[in-house]
Image (cartoon, rainbow, N blue to C red):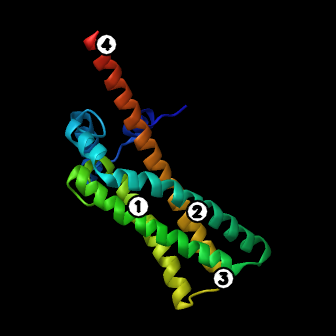
Amino acid sequence: MLTANRFSGLLDKLDASPWGAASGRKVHMAQESIRGGLYTPEERVRRDATPWTLVQGVLAPVQFLVFLVSLGLVLRYLATGEGLGAATASVVLKTLVLYTIMITGCIWEKEVFGKYLFAPAFYWEDMFSMLVLALHTAYLGAVFAGIGDGYGQMLLALAAYAAYVVNATQFVLKLRAARLQEARMTAMGGMRSA
């Protein structure tokens, strides 16, 4: 199984780009190594104390459920030509939930890391989130401006959804790595006190 740490290590070994440091990727990896993981002890305390952590924890699965229902409606429309209105409404709802989770996520990031976006711990996830937002916003623009037909708009929705799945996977892998790191630190702390 390819874990987040192994995947990151594999990417680092394959990275032949002379621009890695300039793009921030290698700097971010070095900072995370110095930090000892995703969160410093102070950031972990702030993360656990802010109510925005719970908000994010509730909104993420809600967004995923809205996505699943909407994906079904979009695919149904593309396969049968039926239900354009329901599919469109579902993508609009999914986009509104996305905007909500992005805004509350920025507030969470500010409270935990001191930056609204692009904190080193979530730099690449935030970068890819910009693509997700752009595609969802382009969909809304196409619908409300009447650009293209329903079929084309639904294909744009699928592109937005594909980007969302990649971004959600980024966050899940990052948070899983953080949990594993915290479990290791707790185990090491228990061994030291024994």
**Do callouts 2 and 4 mark residues in contact (Cβ within 8 Å)?**
no
Percent across and percent down for residue 120 are 26, 49
Instruction: Name the residue nearer the viewer: 38 or 56.
Output: 56
Percent across and percent down for residue 97 are 48, 67
- Give the residue type that dot 2 points to: Phe
Q: Earlier in the sequence, mark 2 or mark 4?
A: 2
- Give the residue type that dot 3 points to: Gly
Residue 181 numbered tag: none
In this rendering, would 63 be left or right of 188?
A: right
User: What residue is disc 4 on?
Assistant: 191
Percent across and percent down for residue 101 are 41, 62
Q: Nearer the viewer, mark 4 or mark 1?
A: 4
Residue at 48%, 77% in the rendered image: 138
- Give the residue type that dot 4 points to: Met
Residue at 30%, 56% in the rendered image: 108
Q: Earlier in the sequence, mark 3 or mark 2?
A: 2
In the picture, the quarter occupied by the N terminus is top right
User: What residue is disc 1 on?
Assistant: 129
Residue 67 numbered tag: 2
Helix, strand or loop at mark 2? helix
Q: Is residue 5 visible?
A: yes
Real-space CA distance between mark 2 and mark 1, rounded to the nearest whole angstrom: 16 Å
Disc 1: CA contacts within 10 A as few (<14), some (14-19) or many (>=20): many
Disc 4: CA contacts within 10 A as few (<14), some (14-19) or many (>=20): few
Real-space CA distance between mark 3 and mark 1, rounded to the nearest whole angstrom: 25 Å
Helix, strand or loop at mark 3? helix
Helix, strand or loop at mark 1? helix
Q: Is residue 122 above or below residue 41?
A: below
Q: Earlier in the sequence, mark 2 or mark 1?
A: 2
- Give the residue type that dot 1 points to: Ser
Q: Nearer the viewer, mark 3 or mark 4?
A: 4
Q: Earlier in the sequence, mark 3 or mark 4?
A: 3
